[in-house]
Amino acid sequence: MEAKAGGDQAQSVVNAIEKALENYQVFKVEIVQVPGYVESPIRIDSKRLEDHFVYKVTIGDIRGNPYRTDLVAALKSLTTESRETPVDLRWGLIFYNEDGTRAGSIYFDRSGRHGAVNDEPMNFDGIWSNSLFNWLKDNFGSCLR
Protein backbone atom coordinates (compact mmCIF):
# COMPACT_ATOMS: atom_id res chain seq x y z
CA MET A 1 0.00 0.00 0.00
CA GLU A 2 2.88 2.42 0.77
CA ALA A 3 4.34 2.13 -2.72
CA LYS A 4 0.99 2.92 -4.33
CA ALA A 5 0.52 6.00 -2.16
CA GLY A 6 3.99 7.26 -3.11
CA GLY A 7 3.26 6.69 -6.79
CA ASP A 8 -0.07 8.51 -6.50
CA GLN A 9 1.60 11.45 -4.77
CA ALA A 10 4.34 11.59 -7.43
CA GLN A 11 1.74 11.43 -10.20
CA SER A 12 -0.04 14.36 -8.53
CA VAL A 13 3.23 16.32 -8.58
CA VAL A 14 3.76 15.53 -12.28
CA ASN A 15 0.17 16.53 -13.06
CA ALA A 16 0.55 19.77 -11.08
CA ILE A 17 3.76 20.67 -12.95
CA GLU A 18 2.04 19.95 -16.27
CA LYS A 19 -0.99 22.10 -15.38
CA ALA A 20 1.18 24.96 -14.10
CA LEU A 21 3.25 24.83 -17.29
CA GLU A 22 0.12 24.70 -19.42
CA ASN A 23 -1.34 27.71 -17.53
CA TYR A 24 1.88 29.77 -17.93
CA GLN A 25 2.64 29.58 -14.20
CA VAL A 26 5.99 27.83 -14.61
CA PHE A 27 8.57 30.46 -15.45
CA LYS A 28 12.00 28.82 -15.58
CA VAL A 29 13.12 25.28 -16.41
CA GLU A 30 16.58 23.97 -15.62
CA ILE A 31 17.93 20.82 -17.24
CA VAL A 32 20.93 19.20 -15.59
CA GLN A 33 22.85 16.19 -16.81
CA VAL A 34 25.74 13.93 -15.93
CA PRO A 35 26.52 11.87 -19.07
CA GLY A 36 26.58 8.10 -18.86
CA TYR A 37 30.32 7.97 -19.58
CA VAL A 38 31.05 9.83 -16.33
CA GLU A 39 31.72 7.20 -13.69
CA SER A 40 30.90 7.80 -10.07
CA PRO A 41 31.94 5.66 -7.09
CA ILE A 42 28.58 6.42 -5.48
CA ARG A 43 25.04 6.61 -6.79
CA ILE A 44 24.09 10.05 -8.09
CA ASP A 45 20.99 11.24 -6.26
CA SER A 46 18.99 14.40 -7.01
CA LYS A 47 21.08 16.65 -4.75
CA ARG A 48 24.35 15.38 -6.18
CA LEU A 49 23.03 15.76 -9.74
CA GLU A 50 22.01 19.38 -9.09
CA ASP A 51 25.27 20.22 -7.30
CA HIS A 52 27.73 18.32 -9.54
CA PHE A 53 26.18 18.34 -13.01
CA VAL A 54 28.42 18.27 -16.07
CA TYR A 55 25.91 20.16 -18.22
CA LYS A 56 23.18 22.62 -17.35
CA VAL A 57 20.72 24.30 -19.70
CA THR A 58 18.40 26.99 -18.39
CA ILE A 59 15.28 28.07 -20.22
CA GLY A 60 14.91 31.49 -18.58
CA ASP A 61 11.27 32.04 -19.52
CA ILE A 62 9.47 28.94 -20.82
CA ARG A 63 6.12 30.72 -21.15
CA GLY A 64 6.70 31.99 -24.69
CA ASN A 65 9.36 29.46 -25.64
CA PRO A 66 8.84 27.05 -28.56
CA TYR A 67 9.80 24.09 -26.31
CA ARG A 68 6.77 24.70 -24.04
CA THR A 69 4.05 23.00 -26.12
CA ASP A 70 5.99 19.75 -26.61
CA LEU A 71 7.08 19.76 -22.97
CA VAL A 72 3.44 20.01 -21.83
CA ALA A 73 2.50 17.09 -24.12
CA ALA A 74 5.44 15.02 -22.85
CA LEU A 75 4.47 15.66 -19.22
CA LYS A 76 0.87 14.62 -19.93
CA SER A 77 2.09 11.21 -21.06
CA LEU A 78 4.31 10.55 -18.02
CA THR A 79 3.01 7.99 -15.52
CA THR A 80 4.70 7.11 -12.26
CA GLU A 81 4.97 4.01 -10.14
CA SER A 82 6.74 4.06 -6.80
CA ARG A 83 9.89 1.98 -6.38
CA GLU A 84 11.68 1.04 -3.20
CA THR A 85 15.27 1.63 -4.21
CA PRO A 86 16.78 4.78 -5.65
CA VAL A 87 18.70 4.65 -8.93
CA ASP A 88 21.72 6.43 -10.36
CA LEU A 89 20.25 9.66 -11.79
CA ARG A 90 21.69 11.25 -14.94
CA TRP A 91 19.08 13.79 -16.14
CA GLY A 92 17.05 16.28 -14.16
CA LEU A 93 14.32 18.78 -14.96
CA ILE A 94 13.70 21.42 -12.31
CA PHE A 95 10.66 23.66 -12.71
CA TYR A 96 10.38 27.11 -11.07
CA ASN A 97 7.51 29.52 -10.54
CA GLU A 98 7.94 33.19 -11.41
CA ASP A 99 8.73 34.06 -7.78
CA GLY A 100 11.65 31.60 -7.86
CA THR A 101 10.01 28.88 -5.77
CA ARG A 102 10.37 25.34 -6.99
CA ALA A 103 7.27 23.90 -8.67
CA GLY A 104 8.77 20.39 -8.73
CA SER A 105 11.46 18.23 -10.25
CA ILE A 106 11.70 15.06 -12.31
CA TYR A 107 14.85 12.97 -12.70
CA PHE A 108 15.83 10.06 -14.94
CA ASP A 109 18.46 7.36 -14.96
CA ARG A 110 20.36 6.53 -18.17
CA SER A 111 17.49 4.44 -19.55
CA GLY A 112 14.69 6.93 -18.85
CA ARG A 113 12.59 4.14 -17.30
CA HIS A 114 13.52 4.88 -13.69
CA GLY A 115 14.25 7.98 -11.70
CA ALA A 116 12.56 10.22 -9.17
CA VAL A 117 9.86 12.82 -8.76
CA ASN A 118 11.16 15.40 -6.34
CA ASP A 119 13.15 13.02 -4.12
CA GLU A 120 10.88 9.97 -4.34
CA PRO A 121 12.26 7.00 -6.35
CA MET A 122 9.98 6.12 -9.27
CA ASN A 123 9.52 3.88 -12.26
CA PHE A 124 8.04 5.59 -15.26
CA ASP A 125 5.39 3.36 -16.81
CA GLY A 126 2.77 3.44 -19.50
CA ILE A 127 2.92 3.14 -23.25
CA TRP A 128 4.26 6.68 -23.66
CA SER A 129 6.25 6.78 -20.43
CA ASN A 130 9.50 7.68 -22.09
CA SER A 131 8.21 10.59 -24.11
CA LEU A 132 9.47 13.14 -21.53
CA PHE A 133 12.84 11.41 -21.57
CA ASN A 134 12.71 11.36 -25.38
CA TRP A 135 11.88 15.08 -25.34
CA LEU A 136 15.04 15.64 -23.29
CA LYS A 137 17.22 13.49 -25.54
CA ASP A 138 15.74 14.76 -28.81
CA ASN A 139 16.11 18.42 -27.89
CA PHE A 140 19.27 18.43 -25.78
CA GLY A 141 20.97 15.05 -26.20
CA SER A 142 23.19 16.08 -29.11
CA CYS A 143 24.57 19.12 -27.32
CA LEU A 144 24.91 17.39 -23.92
CA ARG A 145 27.20 14.45 -24.49
Image: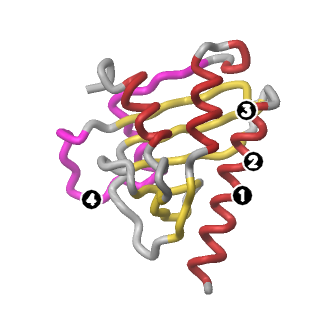
The quadrant holding residue 139 is top left
In the picture, measured across the screen, residue 108 lies left or right of residue 38, that is right
**Circle 3 sits on which residue?**
21
Helix, strand or loop at label 3? It is helix
State the separation of the CA atoms marked 2 and 3: 8 Å
For the residues bearing labels 2 and 3, Cβ distance under 8 angstroms: no
Q: Which badge, 3 or 4, comes first in the chain's sequence?
A: 3
In the picture, measured across the screen, residue 89 lies left or right of residue 78, that is left
Residue at point 32% right, 38% down?
Answer: 34
Please, is residue 12 above or below residue 81 in the view?
above
Report the front residue among 137 and 104. Answer: 137
**Circle 1 sits on which residue?**
12
Q: Which badge, 1 or 3, comes first in the chain's sequence?
A: 1
- Disc 3 crowd rating (10 Å Cα; few below 14, some 14-19, many 20+) is many
Range shown magenta: 36-59
**Circle 2 sits on which residue?**
16
> Which label sits on residue 42?
4
- Reply yes or no: does residue 102 show up in magenta: no
